[in-house]
Amino acid sequence: MEQIKNDQIVTATEVDSGSSSMSTTINEKTLTKFEGSDDINDLSIQLERSAKRTELIQSTEKGSTSAKNPAYVEWHGINYSISEENNHVRKIIENIHGCANPGEVLAIMGPSGCGKTTLLNLLGNRVGSKGVQGTITLNGHKITKNSKRFVAYCTQDDIFFPHLTVKETLSYTARLRLPREMSRRDKLKQVENTMALLNLTKCANTIIGDHMTRGVSGGERKRANIASELLTDPSVILLDEPTSGLDSSLALELTKILKEFAVKQRKPIIMVIHQPSSQVFESFDKLMLMADGHMVYFGERAGVVKYLADQGYKCHPNFNPADYILELLNDNTIKQKLINAYTHKTRDDPTGKQIFEKYSRRTRADNQLNNTILNAPVTSERRWEATFLQQFSILTERTFKQNIKISLSKVNISQTIALTIFCILIWLQIPFSETNINDRIGSIFFGSVVWSFYVLSGSVSSFPLDLVMLSKERQSRSYRLLSYYLSKQIAELPLVLFNPALFTIPVYWATNLLPDFGRFVAYLVVVLLSALTSQSFGYLFGATILNVQKSITVSLVFMLATMLLGGFYIRHLPTGLTWLNILCARPEELPAGELSMCVGDDVPMSSIPGISIIENLGLNDLPWYANLMVLLGFCIVVRVLAYYSLRKNSFRWLVLSFYFNEMLTNNYVDTGSENPEAWNRETASTGIPSFELNIYCKSRQF
């Protein structure tokens, strides 16, 4: 009966979705009926949203994987443990089992630290294989890299680029992850429909924002996070605390939308939720209760009250069952009794295989779908929906839009202009005389070094700040790491060169270095290439250390060392500056006892060529073009090293992210400031050095 009922719901939805003209007629009749009523505006809004939802379903139905081949998620015998000191193994979750059918919403509930998020990570294949036992399948097949991208995962943290608008964020996601057969116009139309579905149209052109930049509200961020996964037509949707930070009305509305989406798109939705309202609780189909990593209940949501009553814990009729459940599970004595009761119930089936088979419609005899569909693997022939060139183009555009608002902000432009004016006032029209040689060297030195420092300090934070977003998108198989890295180089190239050029062009001519256009171009090229080389080292330090503070410290030491050894103080000055031609000083212009550079064994000179100054300082070991080639070589080689360092460390970052979320659940994110013993105990259990976890937590601003 349950299968027939669900099939009737799906059939009714398809009929309703397939006839837009019928829907329009009904809408017109309904509006006529209520014409003149005070509720006409609310009714119009509801009908418009309903039409938008129908349009969304119609737009995704043709290419929908889940509509053609619905996914059944099943797991049994799931155990997860981590190694502690002295080879001691601590079990995080034990003997977990369950299933999620298409068109159903499964809620995982339990007190904080019971293993809910850990289970969700395991179902999403985001933990790896170490310490994991048991079986997790999609349509009877184990999850692979190709099938993993059909499993949408909405994390509790809403991770976005803060300077992109809601519409831009969703548009880039659609262009990267929707099937390549879809035209760009259809993808953007689906974005519009998804925003309408989740009531994001009003804030479509508002930036996401973060803790420093004002943007959309917390509820809108949460809905945007869910929208970014819904619009890609996943076969399975996993959500970690989707209603956290929302008031009761918004939480209920979001849950209803997810429920409707699950039924009409025939998707299983699995959500971790802490303390839902009674109305939200009533919208769940299946319920799993966990405590201390063990099962307490799995089955129909409607049957949990009776089950608890059978165990001697009767819920008051007017009491919210969800609140009552958490009240029981927060009592250590009752919690242990319920764990023991469920363990006793499944004593003949310790892995829970018979339990999930009881509730899984895939294994039911009355399932009307044939075995080919029921056992069809959820996979794709392509590793990525977008081609490499498409990924490169889309990511370049996105990175440029995100970073232009930072690099060319009012603060940065004002800083550059102020620095330019200050340098012009100090070195305005430097005379071509021997007494002003040091002034010219100082001007050249400052113009080269200041932008190397400026660019380096900005680039070291680039990868550490992007890595959380990079990890999220790489987990969903959105793009290759190489396409991301190359797009970042191209997108940031004009941005990193803008401020040095804005400074160098007026300062060069105002300080009277040499009024020759060819010499000016050579000087500008040296400054810009030095800035790019500094950026390369910044990328390398950031990708290797993965911590902003430590990367900046290392980069400052590096810059000071190269400044001291770069030629202005000792040797190896880049000799692209050999075009200087300085007039000799008169005897009375020099300090007492100092001889002019023009006086020597040869005939006295009337002017001093720039090459003579460089030779006098012993800085002419290499010709100017050789120095440029060295700079260019450093720029390229260091960027290649930065890529391989990022590739190596990005996976380690994912592991750190997982353990960080575990510690967040167990309230150990204070990095030892309040409870050092507990923190050291937790870091030891991860097998990762505590200083690395400290770095990660601090980079996440905890």
Image: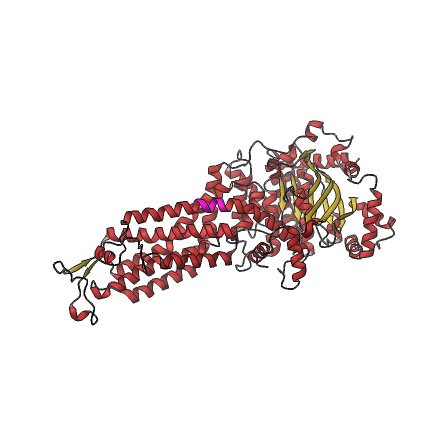
Judged from this view, the residue extending furthest toward the left is 603
Q: Residue at x 68, y 42 (%)?
A: 132
Left or right placement of residue 204 versus residue 418 in this view? right
Judged from this view, the residue extending furthest toward the bottom is 592
Where residue 49 appears, as percent x and y from the top left, is: 63, 46
Left or right placement of residue 379 versus residue 620 in this view? right
**Does residue 41 appear in this view?**
no
Q: Residue at x 81, y 39 (%)?
A: 349
Identify which residue, 666 or 8, lies in the foreground. Answer: 666
Identify which residue, 7 or 45, lies in the foreground. Answer: 7
Where residue 234 appears, as percent x and y from the top left, is: 62, 39
Identify which residue, 684 or 41, lies in the foreground. Answer: 684
Residue range corresponding to the magenta coloring: 640-645
**The image quarter in which residue 385 lies:** top right
Q: Does the magenta stretch include residue 464?
A: no
Identify which residue, 211 or 570, lies in the foreground. Answer: 570
* The N terminus - image quarter: top right
Q: Does the magenta stretch include residue 642?
A: yes
**Does residue 213 appear in this view?**
yes
Q: How many labels does the image show?
A: 0
**The image quarter in which residue 351 lies:** top right
* The C terminus - image quarter: bottom right
Where residue 668 appears, as percent x and y from the top left, is: 66, 58
Left or right placement of residue 495 versus residue 215 in this view? left
Left or right placement of residue 580 versus residue 493 in this view? left
**Majority SS type along the magenta span:** helix
Q: In the rendered view, tell whether residue 181 sits above or below residue 599.
A: above
Where residue 587 appears, as percent x and y from the top left, is: 16, 69
